[in-house]
């Protein structure tokens, strides 16, 4: 059972435009959400996170929005850059647990 | 200076063999993890150790045995390898949370691609 879902396997956008990556979850116990970015042949690297007490967290070009009622979060990247091309994983945890539940990832391609 | 390193990067072996994957972190973290990314690309936690003590043990066959000689190392030993064990295995580490509800950031190694023939 997939508790964290990234239903779109890929997204292609033009450089300078906004990239919106979506993630849905089913477990209402989740209270902390993270986005990881992964380049080929490398491990995932932490990008940004959000606690369930917030609905938005911003870090430079990256903003994560959380809609708890819809059990949905999204990652906005603006402006998108070719170096952002990677696989993005959504992850969730609860109760301060170290156990992260990951989605299957979404490949973002930013075209010059 | 690699923060979390794994060896080997690639491992090809026959069914039935026993193999080990090593992981080392130089971040001074207290918690280390093993994840498996299968052919469907899901990244799933297998184990976590905190200061050499097993904390998380997901439903993993007992052919998989993590070993932590010290808090900077968490090795994964796999007995009697099966075709379904083919995957990419990632090691990760994090610092202990001191307070608050958030989960500590996990730093991942580059992965070990295991292929069982």
Image: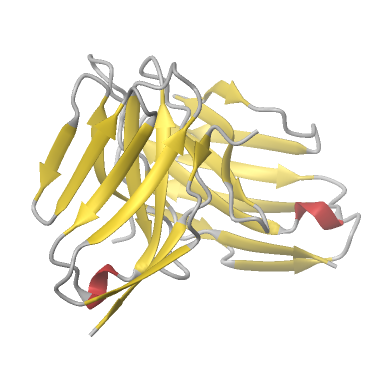
Residue A89: % across, % down: 42, 50
- Please say if A66 is above or below A41: above
Q: For the point 65% across and 55% down, which residue is it? A: B40
Going by the image, does A71 lie left or right of A52? right
- Please say if B89 is above or below A17: above
Residue farthest bottom in this picture: A112
- Please say if B45 is above or below B83: above
Residue A108: % across, % down: 37, 67
Q: For the point 27% across and 22% down, which residue is it? A: A52
Residue farthest left in this picture: A60
Residue farthest right in this picture: B16
Which quadrant of the structure image shows residue B77?
Answer: top right
- Please say if A88 is above or below A99: below
Q: For the point 50% across and 61% down, which residue is it? A: A9
**Quadrant location of the N terminus of chain B in the rendered image:** bottom left
The structure's colour scheme is secondary structure
Q: Nearer the viewer, residue B43 or B96?
A: B43
Q: Nearer the viewer, residue A106 or B46?
A: A106
Going by the image, does A93 lie left or right of B20? left
Q: For the point 48% across and 57% down, which residue is it? A: A8
Residue B42: % across, % down: 58, 49
Q: Is residue A7 in view from this perspective?
A: yes
């Amino acid at each position: 059972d997939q508790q964290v879902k990234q239903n779109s396997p890929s997204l292609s956008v033009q450089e300078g435009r906004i990239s919106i990556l979506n993630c849905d979850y089913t477990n209402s116990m989740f209270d902390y959400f993270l986005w990881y970015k992964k380049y080929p042949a490398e491990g995932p690297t932490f990008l940004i996170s959000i606690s369930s007490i917030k609905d938005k967290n911003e870090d430079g070009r990256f903003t994560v929005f959380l809609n708890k009622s819809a059990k949905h979060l999204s990652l906005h990247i603006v402006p998108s850059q070719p170096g952002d091309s990677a696989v993005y994983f959504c992850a969730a945890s609860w109760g301060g647990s170290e156990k992260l539940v990951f989605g299957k990832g979404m490949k973002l391609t930013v075209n010059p | 200076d690699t923060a979390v390193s794994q060896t080997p990067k690639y491992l090809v072996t026959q069914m039935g063999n026993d193999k080990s994957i090593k992981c080392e972190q130089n971040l001074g973290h207290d918690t280390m993890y093993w994840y498996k990314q299968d052919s469907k690309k899901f990244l799933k936690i297998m184990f976590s150790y905190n200061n050499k003590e097993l904390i998380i043990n997901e439903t993993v066959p007992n052919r998989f045995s993590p070993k932590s000689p010290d808090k900077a190392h968490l090795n994964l030993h796999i007995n009697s390898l099966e075709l379904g064990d083919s995957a990419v295995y990632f090691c990760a580490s994090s610092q202990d949370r001191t307070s608050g509800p958030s989960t500590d950031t996990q730093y991942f190694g580059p992965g070990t691609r295991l292929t069982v023939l």
